[in-house]
Amino acid sequence: MLRLPDNASIGEYTIARFIKKGLYNDSYVIRDENGKPFFMKAFDLERIPDKMLVEGLVEEIWQCRRISHTNIIKYAADGILTVSGHKYPCLVTQFFNGALLSEALRGGKTFSVAEAKAILIPILEGLMYLHGELGVNHNDLTPRNILLETSPEGDVTPKIIDLGHMHADIESAPPFPVDDLNVLYLAPEALKGTFTSKGDVFSAAAILYTMLYGFAPWDCGVSEKTPYYSKKITVQHAREASLVFPSNKPDDPGIVDLLQRGLRFNAAERPSAAEFLEMLSAGVAPQTPALSHNQAARRRPPENPQEPADPKEPPQTPSGESEKTREDNVNLQARRGKPGEGGFADVAGMESLKQELINRVIWVLKDKEKAARYRLSPPNGMLLYGPPGCGKTFFAKKFAEESGFNYYLVNGSDLGSTYIHGTQGKIADLFKKAEQNAPSVICFDEFDAFVPARGSDSARHRADEINEFLSQLNNCSERGIFVIGTTNRMDMIDPAVLRKGRLDLKYEIPAPDAETRRAMFELYLKGRPLDGEINLGKLTTLTEGYASSDIAFIVNESAMVAALADQPITQQILEESIQANPSSLSTPKRVKIGFDSY
């Protein structure tokens, strides 16, 4: 198989690093002309069985072109790479920032029922899409093929990845190699060569069992290095015994019954993905910790327990319009921070700033009796400014966790409206909801986009919206609201917003210094499988001038490369990731190498 060198060019992409060698393809991290990362598989046609070709295309490429679902890895591009007369079909997919579920389960770690449901429900939605709309099965659903993609705000979106075994129902001999399949998660009929949608349900139930108990059902300790046939026989023998449910059964009366249904040997007696999802969803809390707000909103209507709706009359907005007919009502849910969990402990470095905020802000907001005794007015809000990617929004979230207050993260699109004065109404709705759920922290990400300086081109026709902001910001601390704005363009913000009585405090979040970078590496590497000693000092030196997000990305990319290669994270992998990822605060130098020299 062809091994492409780092920095080689393929059309608009550049090879960043080799990941691993598969049965009939090699995997790489690549970057486009803007430095954005992607995954690429390069297939060797000479090694791919003819049955894995559809209309002359590798089936994985053909199927990926058709897929469009939030919880399935996203197709980006494909093409043919020709080297020395040999053609290698290439598939480019999105690069994911997060951890594989198999990593999260390492060492026998378990999840609560709520956490496990929050991960598996989106996966089942993805399976329903594959089974229904596309008419195919995944056929290789395991913890290693579920990604827990993490956003910069810490929200987790489970995704199905690695579609190399995807195919329609198979009655006997599969068209794809089976040597790389994990037998512990294969349905009994799949071990005999029959792959159907009910087999995916068996795999999903086995994953749920693993998340709850820390090991796979009928786990018989088979080794990855054992030949496939031997592993299959071992698992078949293990399944002759009854399924064991450990004494630490989940605190959910229906979960054991659900697992037994999903893990039935007779495929006809198993529920479909839709039926399994319906049973699993029963009793799910309105918002589970592992779900992003967007996912929760997609499955459930927003609720406001403090304002029960009158069934006879739709609730009214400040403008008098019905919520049912307006598209611009605020649909943001608060997240309550928990003191002692997360908070500033998750923030590497910046000790003086953290201590100042504890001393000047948090205790004043929390200890109202003492503040009143000393006639201290709580601050109204603060502006966090500095270069992009240095953790301003992340810091704001951790501030809310440290304080234990409800937290609202607001992006520009959240307040947009197609109605005249609609945005004004949404601003008023937001502050009203925050007041009802006080104490609250509202964080406006990219604050300059909300309140541009009046008189500038960007503020044209927006004077009413800015005035509404100014009105709401006035002494909002008296209503139990603390406002945080983040920006890398403080000069673009209307000066009236920055005066005392609105955003009282201003703090710079600069690119991390050496001490902070070292602490970040130590924090981000904690709990991950490491190979020997990691030289934090060298990593700190190599990342001079890097943004906080750059370092988080480097560690996550290194973990992903190590996980896909099934090895611990090494110093070499980390240093190669640093070399392949120049600082986002400077313009990277790109090297293009042609293929003529191969």
Image (cartoon, rainbow, N blue to C red):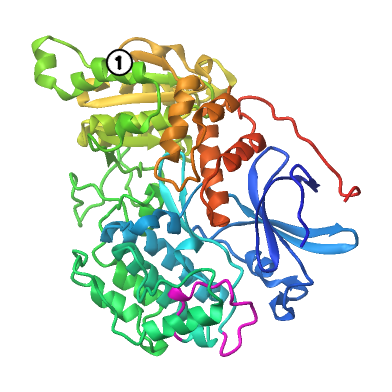
User: Against 397, is 513 above or below?
Assistant: above
Residue 476 location, quadrant: top left
Q: Residue drawn 36% across and 25% down?
A: 484
Left/right placement of residue 552 relative to residue 300 reads right
| Residue 541, horizontal then vertical, whole percent | 57, 24
Q: Point out the residue furthest to the front here.
A: 532
Secondary structure beneath dot 1 equals helix
Identify the residue at image location x=22%, y=65%: 250
Of residues 70 and 22, the one nearer the viewer is 22
Find residue 113 and report its image quarter: bottom left
| Residue with the mark numbered 1 | 356
Residue 447 spot, x, y in % from top left:
45, 25
Q: Could you say where residue 491 lies in the image, as x and y percent from the top left?
A: 52, 14
Whether the magenta-drawn stretch holds residue 80 is answered as no
Q: Residue at x 34, y 42 (%)?
A: 332
Is most of the magenta stretch helix, strand or loop? loop
* Residue toward you, 393 or 576: 576
- When asked about the image quadrant of residue 593, the answer is top right
For this rendering, which residue is in front, 427 or 277?
277
Q: Is residue 7 left or right of residue 143?
A: right
Q: Is residue 185 magenta?
A: yes
Q: Amino acid at mark 1?
A: Glu
Quadrant where the N terminus sits is bottom right
Q: Which residues are magenta?
A: 170-188
Is any part of residue 470 visible from this angle? Answer: no
For label 1, the crowd category at 10 Å Cα-Cα, with few meaning under 14, some 14 to 19 and many 20 or more, is few
Residue visible at 30% across and 53% down in the picture:
288
**Relative to residue 248, is residue 334 drawn left or right?**
right
> Which one is nearer the viewer's eye here, 158 or 208?
208
- Place of residue 574 in the rendered image (x, y in percent of width and height, measured from the top left): 57, 39
Judge whether 557 appears above or below 238 on screen: above
